[in-house]
């Protein structure tokens, strides 16, 4: 639970894997709030998506990618996002918007979340222009077909994706990548 005077925001997503686009949103959020909690959706959250990395692996990759941000922590998302947010003393959900195509889905989610818990609001940050075409599923496709991931994901994620392709373990040592 946050101290009463702390401004805390939750940044949710599946992060399969975390990209430079996500990282840009986290860094900008971390400059606006005292604390950012990244909430990582469980493997089972979307039956249409077959995850490349397990929740633990995605959290490990996020931990490594955000190591330079002392006010960012990573937790698994359980239950409703608004309940998770309120339980941590946060009143803001941060999300990134990349293009008009994101808008309709995001609007429906923001309105549903507000109906569930009016005290929790959603704050949208516009993705930086150079990241607006990046998505985790496109990154997975490029990796699967052997393309370069330079500039699309943090180097440790590119390394983890190469390891996954070779059938090697993704997480080593103490759980960081
Ligand atoms: N840069 C790069 N990619 C971005 C991005 C950015 N700034 N913002 C979004 N994306 C991409 C993601 O990588 C993802 O790509 P993919 O579909 O290719 O994998 C896609 O956009 C969707 O991202 P996101 O908005 O994070 O959705 P998600 O499916 O990863 O996660 C939750 C959705 C977890 C936020 C949502 O399901 C949720 O809130 N679940 C909790 C349960 C709940 O409360 N449900 C009621 C909600 S109304």
Image (spheres, rainbow, N blue to C red):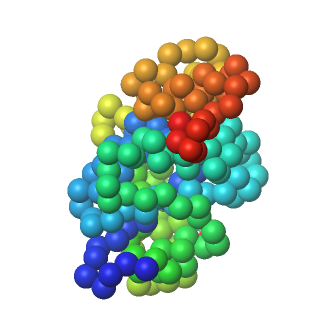
**Picture coordinates of residue 130 (x, y %)?**
32, 31
Residue at image location 32% in from the left, 55% down from the top: 70
Left or right position of 79 against 133 = right
31 or 65: nearer the viewer: 65
Residue at image location 37% in from the left, 57% down from the top: 72
**Picture coordinates of residue 61 (x, y %)?**
52, 42
Compared to 24, does 6 lie above or below?
Answer: below
Q: Of all residues shown, which one is farthest toward the front? A: 173
Compared to 2, does 174 lie above or below?
Answer: above
Residue at image location 47% in from the left, 63% down from the top: 107
**Picture coordinates of residue 137 (x, y %)?**
60, 35
Compared to 139, does 89 lie above or below?
Answer: below
Residue at image location 48% in from the left, 31% down from the top: 156
Q: State the quadrant of the N terminus.
A: bottom left
150 or 74: nearer the viewer: 74
State whether residue 141 appears in this view.
no
Left or right position of 55 against 31 = right
Location of residue 150 (image quadrant): top left
Left or right position of 97 against 117 = left
Location of residue 142 (image quadrant): top right
**Picture coordinates of residue 26 (x, y %)?**
36, 51
Compared to 97, does 64 lie above or below?
Answer: above
State whether residue 75 appears in this view.
yes
Number of numbered discs visible in the structure rendering: 0
């Amino acid at each position: 639970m946050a101290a009463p005077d702390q401004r805390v925001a939750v940044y949710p997503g599946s992060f399969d894997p975390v990209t430079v686009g996500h990282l840009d949103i986290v860094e900008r959020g971390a400059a606006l709030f005292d604390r950012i909690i990244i909430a990582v959706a469980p493997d089972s959250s979307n039956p249409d998506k077959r995850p490349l990395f397990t929740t633990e692996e995605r959290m490990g990759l996020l931990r490594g990618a955000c190591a330079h941000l002392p006010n960012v922590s990573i937790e698994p998302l359980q239950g409703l996002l608004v309940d998770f947010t309120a339980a941590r003393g946060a009143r803001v959900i941060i999300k990134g918007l990349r293009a008009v195509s994101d808008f309709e889905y995001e609007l429906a989610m923001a309105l549903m979340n507000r109906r569930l818990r009016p005290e929790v609001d959603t704050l949208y940050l516009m993705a930086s222009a150079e990241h607006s075409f990046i998505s985790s599923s496109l990154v997975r496709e490029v990796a699967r077909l052997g393309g370069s991931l330079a500039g699309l994901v943090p180097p440790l994620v590119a390394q983890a994706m190469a390891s996954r392709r070779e059938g090697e373990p993704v997480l080593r040592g103490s759980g960081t990548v």
